[in-house]
Amino acid sequence: MRLLLQTAFSSLLRPGPPPTRWARPAIAVAIGFALFTAVLIERGWSIHENTGRYFGEGRPGTVAVVVLFVISGVFCLLAARDLGVYAGDRPGKRRFARFWRWFAVLLFYLAADDMFKVHENLDVMIASAAGLDDEKHWVDEIDSIIVALYLPLMVALAWPHRIRLAGTRWLVVCMSLAIVLFIGMVVIDISEGPVALEESLKLFAAVAIMLGVAAARDTYRDDFQLSGDQASGEPA
């Protein structure tokens, strides 16, 4: 555990050079979505006097989150494919490839959840099945509790591969940011804070996740390229 924490903190404080093809597109994506979010909030206030007007089911802010989760899932599948191709008979890397496939499934579920409000319908089903009064405030927060459980689910999925993931430095940086943003989103949701702020944090968390898995995929590609060059005697 001590080694894991040291590796994770080292990745956060000194992540080192980013993957070869990742840095410039990542900066452009981050700036682009920051501007996109600012425009949605500004337009919502200017036109409707409601900063959260363009967030919600079927609206641009939520559709953007869905698209980001889908793209992140595709990057996970590409990382799994690359690991599968280069792993050979090494069972450790094959298990790691399976982790990325399962992570892709989770991200695709999150995309479907955001698009079709799965967790919000689920809390109604739970309250109905348990015979609870859905008018009570704490019952209404079941959906927030369900969302909060997504984080420990992700941690449980990643835990068997924690050493390998902690060494993927830019993935650690982006996922740490995503976790902070996610926690902030849940707190604002439970405290019934501004919708625009809650949804903006969700959007930024989705951007961070996408950039993190993209960084991981590019890191593995760079590592495979380096290994191939060394094996063939070519300079890296």
Image (cartoon, helix red, strand yellow):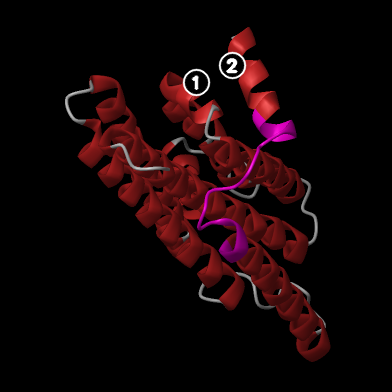
Does 20 lie within the magenta span?
yes
Residue 150, percent from left and from top: 52, 38
Q: How many marks?
A: 2
Q: Secondary structure at mark 1?
A: helix
Query: Which amino acid type is marked by label 1?
Result: Ile
State the residue at coordinates (72%, 75%): 35
Depth order, front residue of 162/57? 162
In the picture, measured across the screen, residue 1 lies left or right of residue 188, that is left
The crowd level at tag 2 (other Cα within 10 Å; few <14, some 14-19, many 20+) is some
In the picture, measured across the screen, residue 61 lies left or right of residue 48, that is left
State the residue at coordinates (41%, 39%): 223
Residue 227, percent from left and from top: 34, 35
Q: Residue furthest top?
A: 2
User: With respect to residue 211, does 10 lie above or below?
Assistant: above
| Quadrant location, the N terminus | top right
Residue 179, percent from left and from top: 65, 40
Q: Are marks 1 and 2 in contact (CB under 8 Å)?
A: yes
- Which stretch is magenta? 11-25
Residue 42, percent from left and from top: 80, 81
State the residue at coordinates (59%, 58%): 207
User: With respect to residue 63, does 103 lie above or below?
Assistant: above
Does 103 lie within the magenta span?
no
Circle 1 residue: 163
User: With respect to residue 60, does 226 lie above or below?
Assistant: above
The mark found on residue 4 in the picture is 2
